[in-house]
């Protein structure tokens, strides 16, 4: 399920006022997590893509901040939001606009529905470990 985000190529700089995290991917692009969403700066510096996390996917009256960006072994970019957000998403960066995709972890649970994800990490066996504040530890095999 792809969650739509707002897209604005004319004003990418406004999203960079409060930078929360940075990631340089294998292609040399710079991903910038902010208080408004995600900005992708192409390696040659010539272009930006800008994604804004929509309020409908967060708790009412809460501020959602992008707290962590992670590139997996396949080059996929993962986004972890602060506790007011809906958790963890994988960015669909191949097409514009960028999309936040909900990630199923088991039949009854979607990672984007687990609040208070505290950390994400991919190990050498291509397992994505998802630490939470109250729900324990989840693991998602990215090779499957």
Image (cartoon, rainbow, N blue to C red):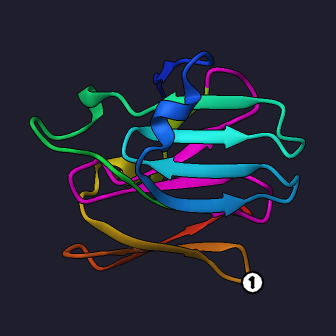
**Does 95 sit above or below residue 108?**
above
Q: Residue at x 53, y 41 (%)?
A: 38
The quarter of the picture where the C terminus appears is bottom right
Query: Where does label 1 land, which residue?
Result: 124
Q: Position of residue 83 (x, y in %)?
A: 24, 59
Residue 63 position by quadrant: top left
Return the residue found at the far left. 61
Residue 93 position by quadrant: top right
Q: Position of residue 84 (x, y in %)?
A: 21, 52
Viewer-proximal residue, 30 or 131? Answer: 30
**Viewer can see residue 76:** yes
Badge count = 1
**Does 57 sit above or below residue 7?**
below
Viewer-proximal residue, 35 or 116? Answer: 35
Q: Residue at x 55, y 33 (%)?
A: 13
Viewer-proximal residue, 70 or 16? Answer: 16
The reply to whether the magenta stretch includes residue 68 is no
**Viewed as shown, does residue 83 lie left or right of 44?**
left
**Viewed as shown, does residue 64 lie left or right of 44?**
left
Q: Which residues are magenta?
A: 70-97
The reply to whether the magenta stretch includes residue 85 is yes
**Viewer can see residue 1:** no
Q: Secondary structure at mark 1?
A: loop
Q: Residue at x 39, y 38 (%)?
A: 36
Q: Residue at x 45, y 39 (%)?
A: 37
Viewer-proximal residue, 19 or 77? Answer: 19
Q: Position of residue 61 (x, y in %)?
A: 9, 37
**Callout 1: few (<14), some (14-19), or many (20+) C-alpha neighbours within 10 Å?**
few
Q: Position of residue 17 (x, y in %)?
A: 43, 44
**Does 132 sit above or below residue 59?**
below
């Amino acid at each position: 399920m792809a969650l739509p985000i707002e897209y604005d190529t004319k004003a990418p700089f406004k999203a960079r006022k409060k930078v929360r995290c940075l990631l340089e991917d294998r292609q040399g692009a710079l991903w910038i997590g902010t208080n408004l969403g995600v900005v992708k700066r192409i390696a040659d510096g010539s272009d930006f893509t800008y994604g804004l996390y929509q309020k409908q996917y967060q708790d009412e009256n809460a501020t959602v901040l992008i707290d962590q960006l992670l590139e997996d072994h396949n080059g996929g970019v993962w986004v972890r939001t602060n506790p007011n957000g809906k958790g963890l998403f994988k960015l669909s960066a191949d097409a514009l606009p960028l999309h936040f995709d909900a990630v199923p972890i088991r039949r009854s649970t979607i990672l984007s529905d687990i609040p208070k994800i505290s950390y994400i990490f991919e190990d050498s066996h291509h397992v994505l470990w998802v630490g939470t504040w109250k729900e324990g530890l989840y693991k998602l095999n990215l090779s499957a």
